[in-house]
Amino acid sequence: EIVMTQSPATLSVSPGERATLSCRASQSVSSNLAWYQQKPGQAPRLLIYGASTRATGIPARFSGSGSGTEFTLTISSLQSEDFAVYYCQQYNNWWTFGQGTKVEIK
Amino acid sequence: QVQLVQSGAEVKKPGASVKVSCKASGYTFTSYYMHWVRQAPGQGLEWMGIINPSGGSTSYAQKFQGRVTMTRDTSTSTVYMELSSLRSEDTAVYYCARALRQAFDIWGQGTMVTVSS
């Protein structure tokens, strides 16, 4: 099983600042990597797939990069609605999720 | 609009089974694979398995092999996930999610399953 490790577990950021979230795979997943946002009491929402392609309706302040084993989700200027938990997911070999990064208000 | 609507919350006793439904609308049901994912309280997301609504073929995560069964009814555009031999650790929100290029682009609202004696 491919293990996905996200860091940090919690990220404290002020509104308007940049947030950088990391995700590492235990073996190469090529570009078969997605990012999801989840708010309390809601289902996850797809943000990025193919490591860097924004899903339909996702604002341009969200961007993804990386390939192989190292990936990054960047939120260029945090808005109030962006405070949530973010999960990475690989789909190169079955499907596994990272444990999540909580982005909280500083 | 494209949506997945799941059945309501369930409370089950240890050893029982639960069957959760997920009704699709707004798109061609047989054109997209469907996954099931669960989330224990305060925990992360865990992939359970996948079903092809067209032919009905399935693949399950090894952890759930022998305990989970995923089926579909094309006449009602509904997929089902049945989990048997329930234990307290199965208490979680269960989600269905549509696959788009292998990522999950549309999610159901979730179904809370509580296992308690």
Image (cartoon, coloured by chain):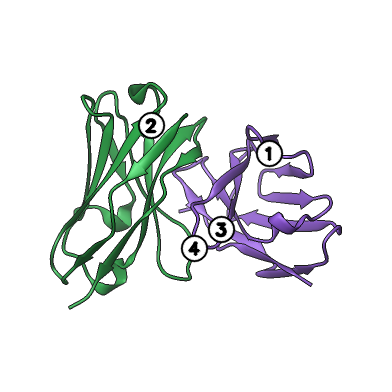
Which chain letter goes with mark 1?
A
- Chain coloured green in the rendered structure: B
| Residue labelled with disc 2 | B33
Considering every residue shown, the one lying at the far front of the view is B1
Q: Are marks 3 and 4 on the same chain?
A: no
Q: Where is residue B85, by image quadrant?
A: bottom left
- For residue B44, the mark is 4
Q: Secondary structure at mark 3?
A: loop
**Image point (34%, 50%), residue name:** B61
Q: Where is residue A67, by image quadrant?
A: top right
Give the spatial CA distance, label 1 vs label 3: 21 Å
| Residue labelled with disc 1 | A58
Residue B23 in the image: x percent, y percent?
A: 31, 37
**Image point (27%, 68%), residue name:** B114
- Chain coloured purple in the rendered structure: A
Question: In the image, is A46 to the left or to the right of A7?
Answer: left
| Residue labelled with disc 3 | A98
Q: Nearer the viewer, residue B87 or B74?
A: B74
Give the spatial CA distance, label 2 vs label 4: 22 Å
Question: In the image, is A10 to the left or to the right of A87?
Answer: right
The amino acid type of the residue labelled 3 equals Gly
Q: Residues within 10 Å of mark 3 (few under 14, many from 20)?
A: many
Q: Residues within 10 Å of mark 1 (few under 14, many from 20)?
A: some
Q: Secondary structure at mark 2?
A: loop
Give the spatial CA distance, label 3 vs label 4: 8 Å
Numbered disc in front, either 1 or 2: 1
Q: Earlier in the sequence, mark 1 or mark 3?
A: 1
Which chain letter goes with mark 2?
B
The amino acid type of the residue labelled 2 equals Tyr
Mark 3–mark 4 contact, CB under 8 Å? yes
Q: Residues within 10 Å of mark 2 (few under 14, many from 20)?
A: many
Residue B91 in the image: x percent, y percent?
A: 31, 68
